[in-house]
Amino acid sequence: MSTPDRLDRVYNIILKRLIATGQAPHYTEIAAEAGLPVEEGRRALHDLVDAGIPAMWLYPETDLLCSFAPFSNLPTQYRISVDGVQKWFGQ
């Protein structure tokens, strides 16, 4: 089980990456940025998703983020643009 501090860090890593690039990071990228071994990064991602935060889930039977409120890592009909640049999708 991850500590609250670790979960906060993973949450912030994911949100910052989504804002910057429009894509959620892979758990290996989360691990690298958090200074964790890869398997601990994967576990921390699962712990965060399992924490019960609504509108955050993994693609079924994978370790890939599908949705992270308010963003969707999969294309949807809800396109988000900032200053004329569209690189995000909403839930």
Image (cartoon, helix red, strand yellow):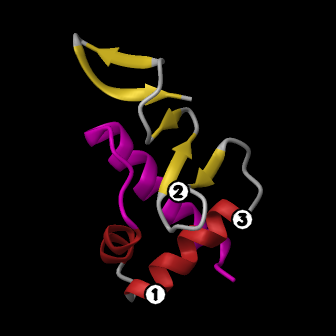
Q: Nearer the viewer, mark 1 or mark 2?
A: 1
Earlier in the chain: of badge 1 and badge 2, it is 2
State the residue at coordinates (39%, 89%): 37
Name the residue that disc number 2 marks: 11
Locate residue 83, reporting x and y percent: 24, 12
Name the residue that disc number 1 marks: 39
Name the residue that disc number 3 marks: 50
User: Badge 2 local density, few (<14 within 10 Å), some, or many (20+)?
Assistant: some
Q: Is residue 11 magenta?
A: yes
Identity of the amino acid at label 3? Asp
In what element is the residue under mark 2? helix
Locate residue 38, reporting x and y percent: 39, 85
User: Badge 1 local density, few (<14 within 10 Å), some, or many (20+)?
Assistant: few
Q: Is residue 85 magenta?
A: no
Residue range of the region highlighted in magenta in the rendering? 1-26
Locate residue 61, reporting x and y percent: 59, 67
